Image (cartoon, rainbow, N blue to C red):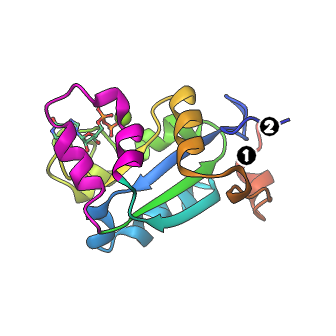
């Protein structure tokens, strides 16, 4: 049986990706989704919501001691929605981080989402899971199991071939 973040190191690997309120407000949702779609990753789940403070705090619980944590929670729960997604495919956790770019947009590759569209670390547009364990935690936090779809995109065998 499949775990919630798929099987690490296989085409069933999954990552939690979230367009933050600045990305939604700036109407970059389509452009950001296109990067993952066009790369060949599979959209397993997507929804738009304003997270509760409890959800935002739990999502970022590892950072609770950091000075920017209260502002980070306020930013994520501002009332402008986020777009929460699960993407699936080979190496999607690491490749998702590359698509997103460095945490501080000033250090991000100009071809990445943050490097192309963001300038401030506190308004860096997007989140992507940084490891298999955090993907497992985050997918479980944001989605119920029945919200995750199981299907095969038409190009899947071409994109994910490993021979
Ligand atoms: P990540 O989003 O690239 O994984 P983390 O270090 O996990 O980066 O930090 C989570 C989020 O916290 C960042 O994406 C950013 O929104 C915010 N953040 C991180 N460092 C700072 C900071 O120095 N000032 C303000 N916000 C920060
Ligand atoms: Mg992080």
Q: Position of residue 75 (x, y in %)?
A: 23, 54
> Residue at horizontal 30%, vertical 62%?
21
Task: Give the labeled residue for mark 1.
Answer: 160
103 or 106: nearer the eye? 103
Q: Residue at x 78, y 56 (%)?
A: 150
Q: Is 138 left or right of 3, judged from the image as shown? A: left
Q: Which residues are magenta?
A: 53-79
Magenta span: predominant SS is helix
Q: Based on the picture, tell me whether residue 105 belongs to the magenta stretch.
A: no
- Residue 66, given in percent of the width and then of the height, sits at 19, 28
Pointer 2: what residue? 2
Ligand 1 is in which quadrant of the figure?
top left
**Number of on-image labels:** 2
- Distance Cα–Cα, label 1 vs label 2: 18 Å
Q: Horizontal placement of 117 versus 148: left or right?
A: left
Residue 67 lies in the magenta stretch: yes
């Amino acid at each position: 049986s499949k775990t919630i973040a798929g099987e690490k190191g296989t085409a069933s690997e999954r990552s939690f990706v979230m367009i933050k309120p600045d990305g939604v407000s700036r109407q970059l949702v389509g452009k950001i989704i296109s990067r993952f779609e066009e790369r060949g990753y599979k959209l397993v789940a997507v929804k738009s919501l304003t997270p509760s403070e409890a959800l935002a705090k739990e999502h970022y619980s590892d950072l609770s001691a950091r000075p920017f944590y209260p502002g980070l929670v306020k930013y994520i729960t501002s009332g402008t929605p986020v777009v929460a997604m699960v993407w699936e495919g080979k190496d999607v956790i690491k490749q998702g981080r590359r698509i997103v770019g460095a945490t501080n947009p000033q250090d991000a590759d100009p071809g990445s989402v943050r490097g192309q569209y963001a300038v401030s670390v506190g308004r860096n547009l997007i989140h992507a899971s940084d490891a298999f364990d955090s993907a497992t935690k985050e997918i479980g936090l944001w989605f119920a199991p029945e919200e995750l779809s199981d299907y095969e995109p038409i190009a899947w065998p071409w994109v994910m071939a490993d021979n």
